[in-house]
Image: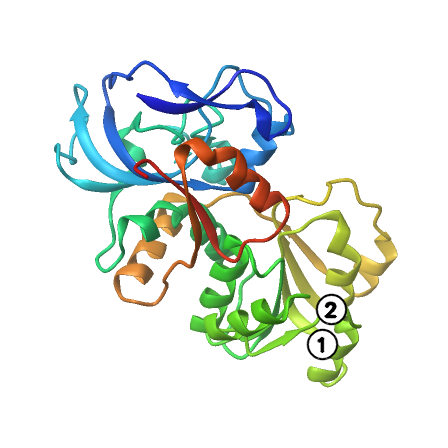
């Protein structure tokens, strides 16, 4: 089968396209003929070595396709069924919480979805939500469930509250805007690109500011000098000072990811004097994934597709994401 394999870490050049043995589903697994795989920042962190993996590996944490075969004991998904391959492999019989902190991830703990076929635990499969195409479903779970976890579960967002989404033009950012808007919040965002500012308004942001200006001051003006209740922070070191400056006293900062760097010096007095809550977020629970799929099925949430690259152009897809040229999800298509 055609696949992208990493034999070493480094630049996009380590993504090697070629033939790879067809996997066989083990007991409890299903073989999925993938039509699309999603490109996520996680894949880039794996590629550059920030997330350690055992090499060689096929990267890619999520996708969508059709069940081809099942191993012994894999129930619920017969061959021919269209499915979403979700990212997280949750431990069975595990009493410790939060459960998502103990989950393994496809494309990290084992071969993932940058391939024509993937054998995955049947527990990772879900039916494609009604009304979503395979393209939309392929890159839906990781960003959508993470955004739900950040805004609703950890962020505790309530109707009428004000939220700023930092890193709004990526997959998690767009999903967070839509979920926050559906929750009845007032949503702010910022980007330097005028076209992307308009698109952010289209997906649900009430006000979108220009990052070339003093947008923290503009957000404070828009909130009567108080600041926002919640910041959804997806960028990392480069934006943390501004994210903290946007918060009102007693505000919350829900954060995941560290694309711009993970080492950050923080003034503890600034946090405790203003009673700021820092909420680390990692993945999502199975229940949150279920709620996300319900939102999609009822039309409350729809993914935004930026572009679809052929599988053999995975290098170009990674480079587009690294240049921050995308708006929404970048996908790999298994057929040209």
Q: Which residue is mark 1?
A: 219
Residue 264, horizontal then vertical, whole percent: 80, 45
Badge 1: residue crowd in 10 Å (few <14, some 14–19, many ≥20): many
Residue 170, horizontal then vertical, whole percent: 55, 55
- For the C terminus, give its image quadrant: top left
Kind of element beneath mark 2: loop
Chosen colour scheme: rainbow
Marks 2 and 1, Cα distance to the nearest angstrom?
Answer: 7 Å
Residue sitting at 19 percent across and 20 percent down? 71
Q: Which mark is residue 304?
A: none
**Mark in front: 2 vs 1:** 1
Question: In terms of image quadrants, where is residue 248?
Answer: bottom right
Task: Decide: is 212 above or below 223.
Answer: above
Residue sitting at 46 percent across and 51 percent down? 329
In this rendering, does residue 89 appear at all? Answer: no
Badge 2: residue crowd in 10 Å (few <14, some 14–19, many ≥20): many
* Side of 328 relative to 245 (left or right): left
Residue 285, horizontal then vertical, whole percent: 42, 44
Question: In terms of image quadrants, where is residue 83?
Answer: top left
Task: Decide: is 96 above or below 119.
Answer: below
Residue 105, horizontal then vertical, whole percent: 45, 31
* Side of 147 relative to 334 (left or right): right
Give the camera-side residue of 3 and 286.
3
Give the camera-side residue of 208 and 301.
208
Kind of element beneath mark 1: helix
Q: Are the residues at dot 2 and dot 1 in contact (C-beta closer than 8 Å)? A: yes
Residue sitting at 42 percent across and 31 percent down? 312
**Among the two numbered marks 2 and 1 on one chain, the one whose residue lies closer to the N terminus:** 1
Q: Which residue is mark 2?
A: 246
Residue sitting at 27 percent across and 56 percent down? 132
User: How many marks do you count on the picture?
Assistant: 2
């Amino acid at each position: 089968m055609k696949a992208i394999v990493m034999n070493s870490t480094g630049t996009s050049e380590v993504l090697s396209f070629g033939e790879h043995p067809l996997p066989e589903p083990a007991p409890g697994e299903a073989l999925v003929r993938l039509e699309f795989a999603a490109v996520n920042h996680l894949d880039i962190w794996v590629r550059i070595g920030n997330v350690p993996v055992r090499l060689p590996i096929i990267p890619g944490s999520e996708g969508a396709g059709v069940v081809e075969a099942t191993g012994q004991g894999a129930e619920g998904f017969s061959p021919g069924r269209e499915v979403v391959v979700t990212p997280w492999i949750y431990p069975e019989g595990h009493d410790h919480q939060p459960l998502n902190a103990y989950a393994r991830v496809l494309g990290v703990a084992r071969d993932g979805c940058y391939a024509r076929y993937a054998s995955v635990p049947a527990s990772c499969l879900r039916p494609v939500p009604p009304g979503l195409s395979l393209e939309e479903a392929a890159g839906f779970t990781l960003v959508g469930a993470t955004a739900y976890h950040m805004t609703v579960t950890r962020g505790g967002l309530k109707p009428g509250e004000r939220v700023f989404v930092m890193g709004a033009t990526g997959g998690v950012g767009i999903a967070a805007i839509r979920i926050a808007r559906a929750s009845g919040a007032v949503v702010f965002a910022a980007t330097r690109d005028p076209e992307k500012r308009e698109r952010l308004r289209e997906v649900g942001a009430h006000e979108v500011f220009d990052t070339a200006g003093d947008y923290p001051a503009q957000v404070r003006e828009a909130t009567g000098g108080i600041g926002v209740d919640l910041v959804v922070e997806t960028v990392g070191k480069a934006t943390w000072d501004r994210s903290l400056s946007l918060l009102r006293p007693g505000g919350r900062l829900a954060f995941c990811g560290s694309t711009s760097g993970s080492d950050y010096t923080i003034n503890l007095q600034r946090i405790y004097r203003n009673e700021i809550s820092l909420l680390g977020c990692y993945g999502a629970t199975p229940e949150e994934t279920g709620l996300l799929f319900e939102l999609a099925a009822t039309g409350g949430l729809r993914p935004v597709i930026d572009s679809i690259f052929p599988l053999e152009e995975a290098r170009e897809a990674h480079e587009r994401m690294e240049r921050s040229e995308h708006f929404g999800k970048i996908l790999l298509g298994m057929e040209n």
